[in-house]
Amino acid sequence: MKRIVLIFLVLIISSTLYSEQTVGLFYNTPQSFDGFTLFVPNTSDTTYLIDNCGEKVHFWITNTTPGNTAYLLDNGVLLRTGKSLNPIFNSGGNGGLIQMIDWDSNLIWEYVISDSTQCQHHDIEPLPNGNILALVWSLHTKEEALQAGRLISPNELWSEKVLEVKPDLVNGGGEIVWEWDTWDHLVQDNPELVENYGDVNNPRKININYSTKGFSNKDWLHANSVDYNPRLDQILLSNHNFGEIFIIDHSTTTAESKSDKGGKYGHGGDLLYRWGNPMSYGQGTVEDIKLFTQHDPHWIPDSLVDGGKIMIFNNNIGDTEKLEYSAIYIIDPVMDNLDNYELIEGKFGPVDPSWTYMGDPKTDFFSKNMSSAQRLPNGNTLICESWIGRFTEINSNKEQVWKYVNPIGVNGLIINQGNAINGNISFRIERYSKSHPAFTGRDLTPNGYIEAGSDFTCELYDNKTSVDFEDNIVILINQYSDRVELESEEIIDRIEIFNSIGATIYDTTTKLQTKSINTINFGTGVYFLKIYLNNKVSYRKIMIN
């Protein structure tokens, strides 16, 4: 018979700071989410997986430095980008290779998007169907740019494409099964004799003559991330140079994606949503600009705190004050009941983020480029300040509960403890739950620190003692053998239950103040409850043994 235990809020801050530290683990506390952190040093051919004590539990050696991102698939395969050293597309973030590396560092699949006309860059995104989205630069000549309505153009101008690649793991290579290109959704309001003449204040089009980086920049958009929402079937892009995020419809056919009609939302491949700089479509003033060379915008998984909202690393928000500091934003786009994004006085909402994290003082938190943030299952947030190689985790009170500094520097060389830090950049990091399917049957025995000279001891804490996310909503949870009962002071509209890797295992709509849920088929482990009450959402966590 299973034993069900309610996990109560535990607030324990018990960290030892090592003042002599320069790299590696600085502290791990019971409030940190216990898991394995994947990071890819920018100048190294090795990808690392570490535990919360900063010890190696696995690594992959590859044949090229990253072209910036890597993901761990459910089967334990490392999906990564690699450098093709394309001399034409020589802007920051260039890649060109998409690779799958098995657990033993064998290259089992590779797809090349790198030639004289196009090159993969920055980011890729694995899809639920096994396909892969890739960000791709596409070259257009000066003549093509002028014909498209560009008033002043360098000798070449790059558009941004999203390609969906279906891997062929048997024969190698793959098939492009869907694509979208910014070049099909441009607008300009000058000569009618050239293409794309129209209203540059149209929020669904991209003004080919808008620029924040000058007209000589061939990489005039510089997208730096791609994310996918399976519930909405939408794609989220980061337009670095405009200070904007874009959302487009993935439900279109490739033909529809070139037009302004078709797809689930009826706009073809035109923009469904954009946020960060309404001046790019003729709305507002400089005071309305919210994003400054941002990175890693992504939907928070529905199973987590703030699920369905968008998290963004806002790199250079301090530009407005002539100071160097960053911020992390969460925004909640304004949508109707059909999941259409609403315009408010000509601009897409919201006016401001719903959640912000900054340093105290603000200048203590800064990465001028790259970087990422990830909401964790216990409500904490994992942060990568790429430019200085600092990885931190904060709890719901925005207190640091884990800190690690990347010990891999220039040319992939290890920086030993106490030595000066140089070039320890890592584009993005991600933490995986220890129950992630990639780890099933794997040897994850801690194998020492990456750097030499670290001789302290560290204790790993399981997630039973992690800080729980609580609120002031009174919900009584009674747990018995094979069921859990909820009692609320307010009417419960809906209950969702997710397992430790974020999969939905229970979802019901109800209009009662009490609810009894049969858990006999749940299996042992940690589960997360998302409880909807009127306009509020409450989160609880249970463990079933």
Image (cartoon, rainbow, N blue to C red):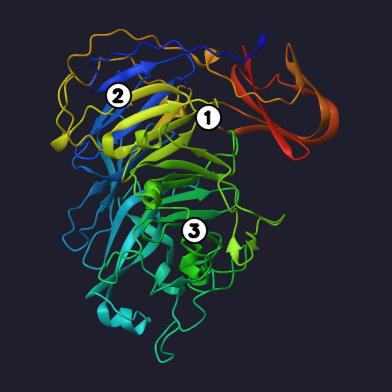
Q: Is residue 167 visible?
A: no
Task: Compare marks 1 and 2 and give the one earlier in the sequence.
Answer: 2
Q: Nearer the viewer, residue 48 or 154?
A: 154
Answer yes or no: do the residues labelled 1 and 2 have beta carbons within 8 Å? Answer: no
Q: Earlier in the sequence, mark 3 or mark 2?
A: 2
Q: Residue 120, how many percent across, how many down?
A: 30, 56
Task: Indicate the position of residue 3 as horizontal and vertical percent values.
Answer: 66, 8
Classify mark 1: helix, strand or loop.
loop
**Relative horizontal placement of residue 285, taking residue 510 as reference (left or right):** left
Query: Measured along the vertical axis of the image, is residue 313 above or below residue 199?
Result: above
Q: Amino acid at mark 2?
A: His
Disc 3/disc 1 C-alpha distance (Å): 40 Å
Label 2 element class: strand
Where residue 367 sits, quadrant-wise, is: top left
Q: Which residue is mark 2?
A: 58
For mark 3, what is the residue?
287
Callout 3 touching callout 2 (CB < 8 Å): no
Is the residue marked by circle 3 packed among few (<14), some (14-19), or many (20+) residues within 10 Å?
few
* Residue 29 seen by the camera: yes
Decide if residue 25 is on the left or right side of residue 309.
left
Residue extending farthest bottom? 193
Place residue 504 in its image quadrant: top right
Q: Where's residue 261, x and y in %?
A: 58, 73
Say the numbered circle drawn on residue 501. Answer: 1
102 left or right, relative to 335:
left
Q: Mark 3 or mark 1: which comes first in sequence?
A: 3
